[in-house]
């Protein structure tokens, strides 16, 4: 007779991975009573324990149980299940790390753009401050120049007055020296007669000289009627001549002079005292008015320039503000386009949809889903939210086999069937970069009615031909993928893999990338040119019309997003 197995409580705890206290609690619930860790259970007590321990771990789905979805806690785990769980955990961790890196990269790029915009704003402010400072300096310099010129003119007038006064003094001295008084202070009869004769002779000489002077030079007045020419009157005549312009200048009587060596002797006989005070006011008035007018004109010109410069800056500022406002309105009215990966957080989806996280959470609550802002949702759920908010969805199919992958195709066909009003763009023709990526995809996609396709960054003309034949030119669009397509490169296919051929050393070390290869060729065009060249070949092969080509290059996208070209 075989010996019955022994079920000690501490050994069961160890085998089942359950704490001893928890196992004792289960035994009490089963009505077995209190047991110590060293107590040995009878077979009947052990059966009662199993019934009670497993009632909370019932298997609802046998298939799920067989596939390792549920299990009864045990110290012995299936190796295959453990390996699969470890692989799934590693995959999830890698995906989380990739998402974190992408978010960090996007955040860094956003911060860099913000810093760049701030630097530009500071630079613009500094430039405007510099311009204002330079304008102030120019205005100050112009004022200082005008003041200096006014001072020079005043000094000049003062100097001329001093010279005139000196001339008056010399005049008075010479007039006194021209007569020789008698011993008693009176002029003798002989002296008077001699003076009369000399005056008569001088008048005769003056008339003779006037007669000999060429016509048009004027006639010298008799000596007894002439006025005195002094520095003050000379200055006055010059100023009056400048003010009157074309007005005929009054003839000034000249004074006969004699040269004795280098000394000029002014003959004042027959003349009288000249009242020079009446000219002082005119001279002062002219100089003052002239200086003031000059200063006013310069200040007016400077103010006009400053006003013109300020008006120009105001116009430029208003124009920039108008452009910014128009761009903001345009961006606001532009249709929303988002790209959704396999898994995306609520916060990231809200950011791509340009709404708050609360809005997305509210939409999900109305759909019967209670999620937090940091929780991740699958692409199907995210698609529903995007569709509710009127977005156009761009789908980058994720799996390695690209367009021919059965899961990728199944998901695209599911979207086609489930969301018949959706506007979904399959990017890059489903990443069909090689003929080996086709499979039977185009035949299956030909039955769709709503899916759209772009050939962004695709240089394979055969893929363009097949997708246009499958869905028609109305559901195919051009995409730029800038600035990636500004790269200098062309694409080849080897053993079912695409290779981007680039100039040596232009893009750093590419040895780690199986899809990159360097060459010493110099005549290499850009990615964008190669894409357009491939479309040109496809259009020629399919004999597309002008309207169909224009639709693919822009018209189809404009119609989708409600834009006018």
Image (cartoon, helix red, strand yellow):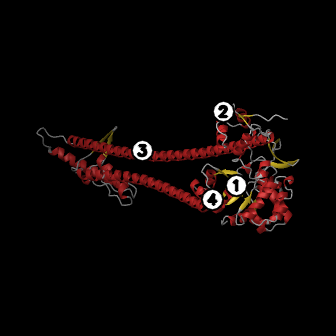
**Residue 161: quarter of image:** top left
Vertical order, 207 against 476 (above or below): above
Q: Answer left or right for 305 relative to 79.
A: left
Find the distance from the CA under tag 3 to the CA under tag 4: 76 Å
Foreground: disc 3 or disc 1: 1
Vertical order, 32 against 408 (above or below): above
**Label 4 element class:** loop
Foreground: disc 2 or disc 3: 2
Disc on the earlier residue, 4 or 1: 4
In the rendered image, which residue does mark 2 sit on? 36
* Residue sitting at x 54%, y 56%: 320
In the rendered image, which residue does mark 3 sit on? 141
Q: Quadrant of the image for the N terminus?
A: top right
Q: Residues within 10 Å of mark 3 (few under 14, many from 20)?
A: few
Q: How many marks?
A: 4
Residue 532 appears in the picture as rendered: no
**Residue 404: quarter of image:** bottom right
**Label 3 element class:** helix
Disc on the earlier residue, 4 or 2: 2
Q: Answer left or right for 544 relative to 351.
A: right
Disc on the earlier residue, 2 or 3: 2
Q: Answer left or right for 163 relative to 381.
A: left
Q: Position of residue 508 (x, y in %)?
A: 75, 39
Foreground: disc 4 or disc 2: 2
Q: Residues within 10 Å of mark 1 (few under 14, many from 20)?
A: some
Disc on the earlier residue, 2 or 1: 2
Residue 394 appears in the picture as rendered: yes
The image's mark for residue 379 is: 1
The image's mark for residue 368 is: 4
């Amino acid at each position: 007779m075989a010996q019955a197995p022994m079920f000690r409580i501490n050994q069961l705890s160890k085998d089942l991975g359950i704490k001893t206290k928890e196992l004792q609690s289960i035994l009490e619930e089963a009505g077995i009573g209190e047991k110590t860790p060293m107590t040995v259970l009878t077979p009947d007590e052990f059966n009662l324990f199993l019934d009670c321990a497993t009632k909370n771990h019932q298997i609802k789905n046998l298939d799920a149980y067989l596939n390792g979805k549920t299990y009864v806690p045990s110290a012995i785990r299936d190796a295959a299940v453990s390996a699969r769980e470890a692989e799934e955990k590693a995959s999830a961790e890698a995906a989380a790390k990739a998402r974190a890196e992408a978010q960090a990269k996007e955040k860094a790029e956003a911060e860099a753009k913000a810093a760049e915009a701030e630097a530009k704003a500071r630079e613009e402010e500094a430039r405007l401050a510099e311009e204002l400072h330079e304008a102030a300096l120019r205005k100050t310099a112009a004022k200082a120049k005008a003041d200096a010129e006014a001072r020079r003119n005043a000094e000049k007038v003062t100097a001329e007055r001093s010279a005139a006064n000196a001339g008056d003094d010399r005049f008075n001295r010479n007039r006194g020296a021209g007569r020789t008084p008698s011993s008693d202070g009176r002029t003798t009869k002989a002296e008077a007669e001699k003076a009369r004769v000399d005056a008569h002779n001088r008048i005769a000489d003056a008339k003779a000289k006037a007669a000999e002077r060429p016509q048009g030079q004027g006639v010298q007045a008799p000596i007894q009627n002439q006025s005195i020419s002094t520095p003050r009157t000379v200055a006055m005549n010059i100023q009056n001549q400048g003010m009157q312009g074309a007005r005929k200048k009054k003839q000034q009587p000249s004074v006969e002079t004699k040269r004795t060596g280098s000394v000029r002797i002014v003959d004042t006989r027959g003349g009288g005292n000249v009242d020079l005070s009446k000219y002082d006011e005119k001279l002062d008035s002219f100089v003052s008015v002239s200086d003031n007018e000059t200063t006013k004109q310069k200040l007016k010109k400077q103010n006009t320039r400053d006003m013109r410069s300020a008006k120009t800056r105001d116009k430029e500022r208003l124009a920039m503000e108008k452009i910014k406002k128009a761009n903001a309105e345009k961006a606001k009215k532009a249709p929303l386009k988002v790209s959704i990966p396999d898994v995306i957080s609520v916060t990231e989806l809200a950011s791509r949809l340009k709404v708050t996280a609360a809005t997305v959470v509210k939409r999900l609550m109305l759909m019967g889903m209670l999620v937090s802002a940091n929780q991740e949702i699958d692409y199907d759920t995210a698609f529903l939210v995007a569709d509710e908010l009127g977005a156009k969805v761009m789908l980058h199919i994720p799996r390695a086999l690209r367009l021919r992958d059965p899961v990728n195709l199944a998901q695209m066909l599911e979207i086609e069937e489930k969301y018949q009003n959706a506007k979904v763009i399959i990017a890059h023709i489903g990443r069909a970069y090689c003929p080996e990526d086709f499979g039977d995809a185009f035949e299956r996609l030909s039955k769709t009615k709503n899916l759209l396709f772009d050939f962004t960054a695709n240089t394979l003309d055969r893929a363009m031909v097949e997708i246009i034949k499958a869905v028609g030119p109305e559901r195919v669009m051009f995409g730029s993928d800038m600035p990636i397509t500004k790269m200098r490169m062309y694409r080849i296919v080897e053993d079912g893999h695409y290779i981007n051929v680039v100039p040596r050393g232009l893009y750093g070390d590419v040895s780690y990338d199986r899809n990159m290869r360097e060459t010493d060729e110099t005549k290499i065009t850009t990615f964008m040119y190669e894409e357009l060249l491939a479309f040109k070949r496809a259009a020629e092969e399919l004999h597309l019309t002008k309207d169909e080509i224009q639709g693919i290059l822009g018209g189809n996208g404009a119609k989708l997003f409600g834009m006018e070209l």
